[in-house]
Image: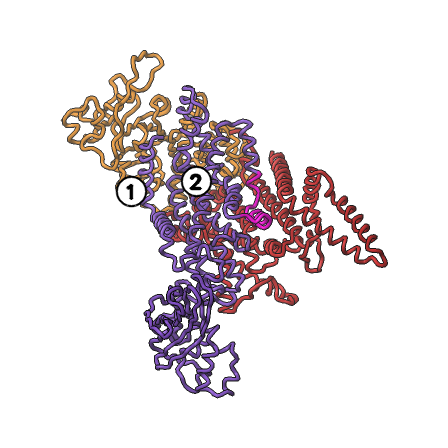
Chain colours: A red, B purple, C orange
C-alpha cells in the first residue's frame, strides 16, 4: 500500500523537476548561450596564443576552424528545440560546465565542485537551526495549547505577529552591528578563522562563527513554529477521541504527549520541513550578510560577478533540493499517518 | 450580490473585527501609512527626493554620513545642525557709474560646540555678475572670503562654498594668530574653513577648536554692472552641520528621512498590488478548478503543483539578475508565483458550495456557467481570501527588498531595500551608522507586522474551519 | 440499599461569559443494581451533560454548583482527580460516547488503545491482558485479529462494538451509553441493541441509556426518565408510562405522539411547536408551559415539584397532581 504511494510520489517529483528545468532552460537560453559563446572565444584565443611561427592569415583560419568546431561541439549550430533539450539533459545530469570567474577552494572551476563544497556548509547551519526551532517550537506550542487564551499564549502570539514580516537579513545586520562591532564578541564573517585551527579547536571555532547566524535564525524562526503547533494541538484537543481517552482514565500527560502529539505528528512534520525549505529559499541574502560560504552566498557572489554558469547550476541544485524536500515531506506524512500508510475502508 | 447584502456582510464583519485589538492596531498603522503617502509632498523635507535620489547636485549642500539632528540631545558636545537660511535682509546701494550693489545678509545663530563643516552660498543670476561672500563674526571681525565673476548667466545658480573656495582667506586670517611653523603641520586638507571661521581667535586656535558662539552675519554681495538687464534673486545659505535631518544622511549626503518616506508608497504598492492580483487569480483558479472538475481540474492541479514546487526567491533573483526588470515587471513575476497560495483552500470551499442546492437551482434555471461562478461563488469566497491577501503582503515586500539588496532593483525608484543596499555598499555596519541601517529594515518589519496583525485578525474571523463547525 | 448510583439535587451549570447555562438544574434519581434506566429528551435538554457529569467529567466550562453523586454510597464530586481516575472512572462507571466513530485515536491500533486502558487500571501481566481483550472482542462478536487494525479500517458498527468492549472489560457496574446507535443504519442498530441486551444479562450490568428515540428506549430499559430543559419532568417504569393509562406529563405525551407507529394509521404526526427555553434565563413557572397545550394559569406562575403520582411513578406537572 505504502510502497505504491511512495513510488508514485517520487515519480511525480522527478517529472515535476524535469519540467521545471526544461522551462528554465528555455527562459535562460539567451543568456546561457551568450556565456557559452564568450567561453568559446576565450578558449579559441587561449589556443591560438600558443601558436608560434604562423602567418596572421593562417592564425585567423585556425581560429575560425576552432570556433566552428567548438560551436558544433556545444551544439550551438543546431535548431532551437534541440539545443534546449540538450541543455535540459545536461542540467539534469548535473553537467554544469565551468564557471566564468568563481573558483573552488582548490582553485578548480568545475561548477559542480564549487556547488558541492558550498552545499554542506549551508546544510550545517540551516538544519541545526531548524532542529532547534522545531524542538523549542513544539515545547512552547504545547504549553500554549494547554492554556489557550492565557497570558503566555497571548503574549507569544503577539510576538509571533510582530516578527512575521521581519526580514532575517535586517535582524542579522542589527545583530552584527551590535555584537560584532560594538561589543566585539563575535567574528564578523565566514565560517572559520583564517587559518582554521586544528583538532578540537576547529569545532569550537566553527561554533563561535556559527553562533550569531544561528541566533538570528532562531530569534525569528521558532515563533511561527510554536504558533502552528498550538493551533494544530488545540484543534486535536477538541476532538472526541481525546475526551474518550480521558474518560477511559488515561492520565493527562499520556493524553497530551501520546495521543495528541502522535496525531499531530503528520502536520507537524509537514510544517517543519516547510520551515526548513523556506530557510533554504531565504538563505541567499542571509548567508551573504554573514559571508557564510554556503549555497546562498554563492548566489550572491555569482550575481555580483556575473558568473552565469554558477548561477544556473546553483539554481538547478536549489530547485532540486526544494523538490527533494517536498517529496520527503509527503513520504513522511504518509508514513506517520496510518490512514495513508495502511489505507483501508472507512 | 446586491449592495445591501454587501453592506450587511461588511457590518457583521466589522463588529467582529472591532473586538480584535491587534487588528485595530494594524488598521491604524495602515491608515497612517496611507495618509503619509497622500500627504507626501507636504511631509518630505526634501521635496524632490523621489526624482532626484541619484542626482548628486541635488544633495550637494547636505552633510555626508551625518547622524540625525536629535542625537544632539544625548551628547555633551553639541554638533551643529545643517540648516538652510532663506530669509535674508536685502540692501541696495548705488555706486558711481550706475552700478548697483546688492547685499543679502543672513543671520546665523551659532550655539554648538563643534564646527560646522561648510557654509554654502547660493544666488541665482541673470547677466554678468561678480559675487563676493563675507562673514561678520560675533567678535566683530569681518572676513571676506571668495569672489566669483560669472558671465552670461540666464537664471543659473551661483554656488560658493567656504570650504572649497574660501580656504585661502581662512588661512590668511589664521596666520594672524599662529606662526608659520605651527601651520606647517596642517595642510589645506585637515583644517577646514569652518574650523577657523567659528573658532575663537587666539594663539593655538589651529590646535584646538573653541567655539565662538553668537550671531554671525553671512553676506552675499553682488554687483550689478547694468542694473537694467542684470539681476540676482533667490539667495539662500546652507550651513552644513555634522548632524542633519530627522534620520540623518547617508554617505552620498542624501537625507534618509526623505528617502524612507518616498519608499513607503513603493512598499505599499508592491505589497498590495502583488497580493491583490495573486489572490484574485488564485481564487478564480480554485473556483474554476473545483467547478469544472474532471480533466480541467486534473490539469489545473498539475500546473499548480509544478509552480508550487519552485523556491521563489532564488528564481526571482536569477530572473532579476538576467532580465533586470523594472518594478512592475517584478510585481508581475512575483504574482506568477504567489497565486498558488490561496488556491487549495478556495478549491475545497468551492467544492462544498458546488453541492449546495441553490447552485443546482441556478443551473436548473438555465444560468450560464460564468454567471454562476461570478454571481454566486466569487462573492462568497472573496472575503475568505482577504486574510491570505493581508498575510502575503509582507512576503512581497521582503522579496523586493531582497532583490534590491543585491543591487538588482529598479534604479528609477527609491525603495527601502535599495537604501539598505546602499548601506551595505557604504559599509554602514562597519562604521556603526545605525541611523542608516536600522530605520529601513525597521520599517519593513513594521509593515510586515501591520499586515500580520490585519491578516491574523481577519483569519480568526473568517477562517473556513471555524465557520462550518 | 441496593442503589448503585444515587444522584441528589444535582446542579451543574456551564459558566460562560454570557451567564451560567443551567444545563442540569436540580436533578435527583436512583439507579438500582441490575436495572436499566432510559434517559430521553430533546437535543439540548441536558442528557449528555448528565452523562458526563456522572462520570465526573463535565465538559468545560461546566462546573458543579451543588448536589451529590453517590456511587456505592460515596460522593464522587469532592474527590481528587487522581482518585476518580484510578478507582471510579472506568472501574465503577464507564461510558460509551455519542458518535463512537470518532472516539478512537486514529494513530494507534485498536489493540494498543485497549491495552493502554487495561494498564492504566490494573497490573494485569501482558498475556492475561491480551486474553482479556480477546475475550471481550469475542463477546461483542469481533475477530481477535482486529487488534492490529487502525480505527479507520473498521466500519462504524465495528468501531461501536470495540468501544462497547472497552467500556465493559474492566467489569464496571454502571455503563452510561449516550446514543450509541444514532449514527448507524437500522440493521446494525438492531445488532448492537441485541448485543447490549445479551451482555446486560450475562454480566448483570446496570445501564443508563441516553437516547432521543423512544422506541429504542422501550426496547432496552426497565425504567424511563424524561428530561426537559435541565429538569426531570417524569420518571417511572416503562409499563407505567407507556401503559394504557398514558404518560403522566404532557411533554411525554407529545413525545409519544411524535413517534411514528408501524401498525397504527396516523393522520398527521404530531410535533411540538416552539423551541426549548433559554437555559441561562429559564421562564418562570413550569419550563414546558410555553409549549404545552394543556397549560393553565398555575403552570405559568409556579414551578411544579417532582412528586409521586402513583407508587414508583413521579411527575412534575400541576395537571397530574392534586393541590
Q: Residue at x 42, y 71 (%)?
A: B131
Q: Residue at x 44, y 55 (%)?
A: B50
**Subunit bearing disc 1:** C
Between B302 and B181, which is closer to the camera in this rendering? B181
Helix, strand, or loop for circle 1? strand
Give the percent coordinates (x, y) of residue C214: 33, 23
- The residue indicated by pointer 2 is A242
Position of the N terminus of chain C, as image quadrant, is top left
Q: Is residue A64 left or right of residue C92?
A: right
- Is residue A331 something that shows in the picture? yes
- The residue indicated by pointer 1 is C15
Quick check: marks 1 and 2 in contact, CB under 8 Å? Answer: no
Position of the C terminus of chain C, as image quadrant, is top left
- Do the residues at discs 1 and 2 belong to one chain? no
Q: Is residue B433 left or right of residue C215?
A: right
Examine the residues drawn in magenta and state their main secondary structure.
Answer: helix
Q: Residues within 10 Å of mark 1 (few under 14, many from 20)?
A: some
Determine which quarter of the picture holds residue B130: bottom left
The vertical placement of A327 against B417, above or below, is above
Q: How many marks?
A: 2
Between C114 and A332, which is closer to the camera in this rendering? A332
Q: Is residue B309 magenta?
A: yes
**Subunit bearing disc 2:** A
Give the percent coordinates (x, y) of residue B301: 54, 34
The vertical placement of A300 against B11, above or below, is below
- Is residue C194 something that shows in the picture? no
Give the percent coordinates (x, y) of residue A157: 41, 50
Give the percent coordinates (x, y) of residue B8: 31, 35
Between A67 and C113, which is closer to the camera in this rendering? A67
Q: Which span of residues is magenta-colored?
A: B306-325
Amino acid at each position: 500500500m505504502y510502497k505504491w504511494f511512495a513510488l508514485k510520489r517520487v515519480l511525480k517529483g522527478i517529472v515535476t523537476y524535469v519540467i521545471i528545468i526544461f522551462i528554465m532552460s528555455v527562459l535562460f537560453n539567451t543568456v546561457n548561450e551568450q556565456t557559452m559563446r564568450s567561453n568559446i572565444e576565450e578558449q579559441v584565443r587561449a589556443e591560438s596564443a600558443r601558436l608560434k611561427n604562423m602567418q596572421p592569415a593562417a592564425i585567423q583560419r585556425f581560429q575560425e576552424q576552432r570556433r566552428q568546431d567548438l560551436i558544433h561541439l556545444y551544439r550551438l549550430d543546431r535548431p532551437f528545440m534541440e539545443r534546449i533539450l540538450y541543455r535540459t539533459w545536461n542540467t539534469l545530469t548535473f553537467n554544469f560546465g565551468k564557471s566564468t570567474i568563481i573558483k573552488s577552494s582548490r582553485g578548480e572551476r568545475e561548477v559542480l565542485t564549487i556547488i558541492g563544497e558550498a552545499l554542506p556548509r549551508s546544510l550545517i547551519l540551516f538544519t541545526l537551526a531548524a532542529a532547534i526551532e522545531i524542538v523549542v517550537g513544539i515545547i512552547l506550542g504545547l504549553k500554549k495549547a494547554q492554556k489557550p487564551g492565557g497570558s503566555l499564549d497571548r503574549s507569544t502570539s503577539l510576538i509571533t505577529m510582530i516578527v512575521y514580516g521581519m526580514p532575517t537579513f535586517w535582524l542579522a545586520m542589527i545583530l552584527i552591528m551590535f555584537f560584532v562591532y560594538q561589543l566585539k564578541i563575535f567574528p564578523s564573517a565566514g565560517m572559520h578563522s583564517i587559518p582554521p585551527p586544528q583538532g578540537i579547536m576547529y569545532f569550537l571555532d566553527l561554533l563561535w562563527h556559527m553562533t550569531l547566524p544561528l541566533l538570528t535564525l532562531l530569534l525569528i524562526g521558532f515563533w511561527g513554529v510554536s504558533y502552528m503547533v498550538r493551533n494544530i494541538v488545540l484543534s486535536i484537543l477538541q476532538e472526541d477521541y481525546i475526551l474518550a481517552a480521558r474518560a477511559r482514565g488515561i492520565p493527562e500527560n499520556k493524553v497530551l504527549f501520546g495521543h495528541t502529539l502522535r496525531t499531530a505528528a503528520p502536520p507537524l512534520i509537514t510544517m517543519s520541513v516547510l520551515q526548513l525549505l523556506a530557510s533554504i529559499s531565504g538563505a541567499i541574502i542571509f548567508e551573504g550578510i554573514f559571508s557564510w560560504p554556503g549555497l546562498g552566498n554563492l548566489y550572491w557572489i555569482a550575481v555580483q560577478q556575473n558568473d552565469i554558469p554558477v548561477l544556473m547550476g546553483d539554481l538547478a541544485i536549489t530547485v532540486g533540493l526544494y523538490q527533494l524536500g517536498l517529496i520527503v515531506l509527503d513520504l513522511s506524512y504518509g508514513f506517520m499517518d496510518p490512514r495513508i500508510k495502511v489505507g483501508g475502508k472507512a | 450580490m446586491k449592495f445591501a447584502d454587501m453592506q450587511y456582510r461588511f457590518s457583521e464583519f466589522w463588529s467582529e473585527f472591532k473586538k480584535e485589538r491587534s487588528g485595530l492596531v494594524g488598521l491604524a498603522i495602515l491608515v497612517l501609512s496611507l495618509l503619509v503617502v497622500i500627504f507626501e509632498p507636504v511631509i518630505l523635507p526634501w521635496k524632490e527626493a523621489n526624482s532626484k535620489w541619484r542626482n548628486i547636485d541635488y544633495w550637494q549642500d547636505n552633510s555626508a554620513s551625518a547622524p540625525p539632528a536629535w542625537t544632539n540631545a544625548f551628547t555633551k558636545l553639541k554638533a551643529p545642525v545643517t540648516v538652510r537660511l532663506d530669509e535674508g535682509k536685502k540692501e541696495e546701494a548705488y555706486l558711481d557709474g550706475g552700478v548697483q550693489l546688492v547685499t543679502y545678509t543672513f543671520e546665523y545663530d551659532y550655539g554648538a560646540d563643534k564646527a560646522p563643516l561648510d557654509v554654502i552660498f547660493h544666488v541665482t543670476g541673470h547677466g554678468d555678475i561678480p559675487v563676493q561672500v563675507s562673514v561678520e563674526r560675533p567678535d566683530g571681525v569681518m572676513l571676506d572670503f571668495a569672489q566669483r565673476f560669472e558671465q552670461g548667466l540666464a537664471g543659473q545658480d551661483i554656488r560658493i562654498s567656504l570650504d572649497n573656495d574660501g580656504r585661502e582667506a581662512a588661512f590668511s586670517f589664521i596666520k594672524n594668530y599662529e606662526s608659520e611653523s605651527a601651520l606647517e603641520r596642517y595642510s589645506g586638507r585637515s583644517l577646514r574653513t569652518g574650523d577657523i571661521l567659528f573658532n575663537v581667535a587666539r594663539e593655538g586656535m589651529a590646535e584646538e577648536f573653541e567655539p565662538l558662539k553668537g550671531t554671525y552675519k553671512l553676506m552675499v554681495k553682488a554687483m550689478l554692472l547694468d542694473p537694467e538687464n542684470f539681476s540676482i534673486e533667490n539667495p539662500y545659505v546652507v550651513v552644513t552641520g555634522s548632524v542633519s535631518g530627522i534620520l540623518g544622511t547617508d554617505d552620498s549626503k542624501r537625507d534618509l528621512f526623505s528617502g524612507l518616506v518616498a519608499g513607503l508608497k513603493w512598499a505599499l504598492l508592491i505589497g498590495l498590488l502583488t497580493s491583490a492580483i495573486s489572490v484574485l487569480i488564485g481564487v478564480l483558479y480554485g473556483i474554476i478548478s473545483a467547478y469544472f472538475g474532471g480533466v480541467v481540474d486534473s490539469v489545473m492541479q498539475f500546473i499548480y503543483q509544478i509552480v508550487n514546487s519552485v523556491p521563489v526567491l532564488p528564481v526571482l533573483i536569477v530572473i532579476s539578475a538576467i532580465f533586470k526588470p523594472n518594478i512592475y515587471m517584478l510585481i508581475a513575476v512575483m504574482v506568477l508565483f504567489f497565486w498558488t497560495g490561496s488556491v487549495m483552500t478556495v478549491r475545497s470551499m468551492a467544492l462544498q458550495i458546488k453541492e449546495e442546492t441553490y447552485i443546482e437551482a441556478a443551473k436548473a434555471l438555465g444560468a450560464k456557467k460564468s454567471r454562476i461562478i461570478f454571481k454566486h461563488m466569487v462573492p462568497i469566497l472573496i472575503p475568505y481570501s482577504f486574510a491570505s491577501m493581508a498575510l502575503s503582503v509582507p512576503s512581497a515586500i521582503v522579496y523586493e527588498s531582497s532583490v534590491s539588496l543585491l543591487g538588482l532593483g529598479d534604479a528609477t525608484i527609491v525603495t527601502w531595500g535599495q537604501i539598505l543596499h546602499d548601506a551595505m555598499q557604504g559599509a554602514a555596519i562597519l562604521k556603526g551608522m545605525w541611523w542608516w541601517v536600522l530605520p529601513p529594515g525597521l520599517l519593513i518589519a513594521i509593515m510586515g507586522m501591520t499586515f500580520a496583525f490585519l491578516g491574523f485578525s481577519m483569519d480568526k474571523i473568517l477562517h473556513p474551519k471555524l465557520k462550518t463547525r | 440499599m441496593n442503589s448503585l448510583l444515587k444522584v441528589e439535587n444535582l446542579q451543574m451549570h456551564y459558566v460562560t461569559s454570557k451567564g451560567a447555562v443551567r444545563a442540569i438544574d436540580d436533578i435527583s434519581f436512583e439507579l438500582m443494581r441490575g436495572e436499566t434506566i432510559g434517559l430521553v429528551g430533546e437535543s439540548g435538554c441536558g442528557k449528555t451533560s448528565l452523562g458526563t457529569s456522572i462520570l465526573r467529567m463535565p465538559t468545560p466550562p461546566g462546573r458543579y454548583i451543588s448536589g451529590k453523586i453517590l456511587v456505592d454510597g460515596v460522593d464522587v464530586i469532592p474527590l481528587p482527580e487522581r482518585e476518580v481516575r484510578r478507582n471510579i472512572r472506568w472501574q465503577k462507571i464507564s461510558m460509551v460516547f455519542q458518535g463512537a466513530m470518532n472516539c478512537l485515536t486514529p494513530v494507534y491500533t485498536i489493540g494498543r488503545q485497549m491495552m493502554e486502558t487495561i494498564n492504566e487500571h490494573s497490573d494485569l501481566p501482558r498475556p492475561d491482558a491480551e486474553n482479556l481483550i480477546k475475550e471481550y472482542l469475542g463477546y461483542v462478536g469481533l475477530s481477535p485479529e482486529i487488534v492490529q487494525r487502525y480505527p479507520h479500517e473498521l466500519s462504524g458498527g465495528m468501531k461501536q462494538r470495540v468501544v462497547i468492549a472497552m467500556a465493559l472489560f474492566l467489569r464496571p457496574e454502571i455503563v452510561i451509553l449516550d446514543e450509541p446507535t444514532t449514527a448507524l443504519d437500522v440493521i446494525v442498530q438492531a445488532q448492537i441493541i441485541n448485543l447490549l441486551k445479551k451482555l446486560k444479562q450475562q454480566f448483570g450490568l446496570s445501564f443508563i441509556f441516553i437516547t432521543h428515540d423512544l422506541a429504542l428506549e422501550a426496547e432496552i430499559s426497565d425504567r424511563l426518565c424524561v428530561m426537559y430543559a435541565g429538569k426531570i419532568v417524569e420518571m417511572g417504569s416503562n409499563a407505567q408510562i407507556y401503559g394504557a393509562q398514558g404518560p403522566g406529563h404532557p411533554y411525554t405525551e407529545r413525545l409519544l405522539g411524535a413517534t411514528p407507529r408501524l401498525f397504527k394509521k396516523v393522520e398527521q404526526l404530531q410535533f411540538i411547536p416552539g423551541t426549548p427555553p433559554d437555559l441561562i434565563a429559564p421562564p418562570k413557572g413550569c419550563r414546558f408551559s410555553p409549549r404545552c397545550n394543556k397549560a393553565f394559569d398555575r403552570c405559568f406562575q409556579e414551578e411544579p415539584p417532582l412528586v409521586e403520582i402513583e407508587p414508583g411513578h413521579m411527575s412534575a406537572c400541576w395537571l397530574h397532581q392534586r393541590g
